[in-house]
Amino acid sequence: MDILDQIASRGMLQKEKDELKRICNRLLSSSFLCQKNDASRSDYYFVLKFRTEFQTLLETLGFRLEINEVDGVIQLTNPQNYNRMNLKLYESILLLILRILYDEKKRELSVSDEAIINLGDIQDKFLSLKIRDKMIDKTTMRNALALFRRMNLIETLDRDLTKEETRILIFNSILMAVRIEDINQAYEKLELYRKGNRSDEETDENETD
């Protein structure tokens, strides 16, 4: 009897067993589920309902399911650091900038308010860091935002990703993707990038699983 049959024998319906497999595959490809993301909310609650079954299955594959009910985020991690995503330099920079902007926005808002920024905020922060003397090009920005959207870190609220007014919702999952005790740590890492210690094609494995 394989592990899925063992799980099913505990009383899961076939439909629930199929959902378990689908959501496990989703976690393996995107790493995060967010309660506040309309696209993943039902999956988030399904994992909470069957957390023991998910943990049993994923542990056999060498993964760990981290559930943060306070922030409404589920993350899949690997203790052996397998299956980590290698980010390009500017993807790493943008991820750190999103973490900083999330923190700044949350300080302005009440706890329940969503962290919504726009593309202009990202470009302004990038220019203020003096990493380069020009803005991030549209293709780099669009590809990075598409990646972070797939990972359930953000949602784009407007279609046109070329305008400064285009709004971006940053989910609480950014807190688990970029785990820093102090926002100054993000600035310190960005300072290393500013000093030119890496080339544009180098990757960074330290930002997210």
Image (cartoon, rainbow, N blue to C red):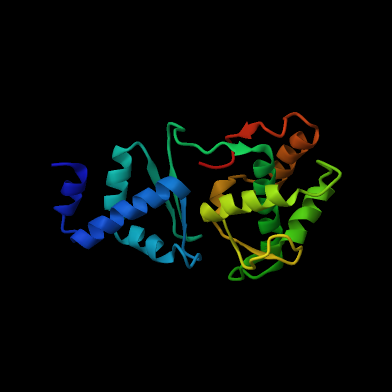
Viewer-proximal residue among 177 and 141: 141
Query: In the visual, does 169 lie left or right of 73?
Result: right
Rendered residue at 61%/70% (across/down)? 113
Viewer-proximal residue among 185 and 97: 97
Rendered residue at 72%/30% (across/down)? 198
**Picture quadrant of residue 179:** top right
- Can residue 182 be spotted in the picture? no
Question: In x, y percent, where is residue 165?
Answer: 74, 67
Number of numbered discs visible in the structure rendering:
0
* Relative vertical location of residue 71 with respect to residue 64 in this rendering, above or below: below
Question: In x, y percent, where is residue 193?
Answer: 75, 36
Q: Quadrant of the N terminus?
A: top left
Query: In the visual, does 43 lie left or right of 133?
Result: left
**Picture quadrant of residue 57:** top left
Query: In the visual, does 35 lie left or right of 166?
Result: left
Question: In x, y percent, where is residue 82?
Answer: 44, 33
* Relative vertical location of residue 190 with respect to residue 97 in this rendering, above or below: above
Question: In x, y percent, where is residue 189?
Answer: 71, 38
**Picture quadrant of residue 156:** bottom right
Rendered residue at 17%/41% (across/down)? 2
* Relative vertical location of residue 10 with respect to residue 187 in this rendering, above or below: below
Query: In the visual, does 89 lie left or right of 44?
Result: right
- Can residue 65 be spotted in the picture? yes
Rendered residue at 17%/53% (across/down)? 8
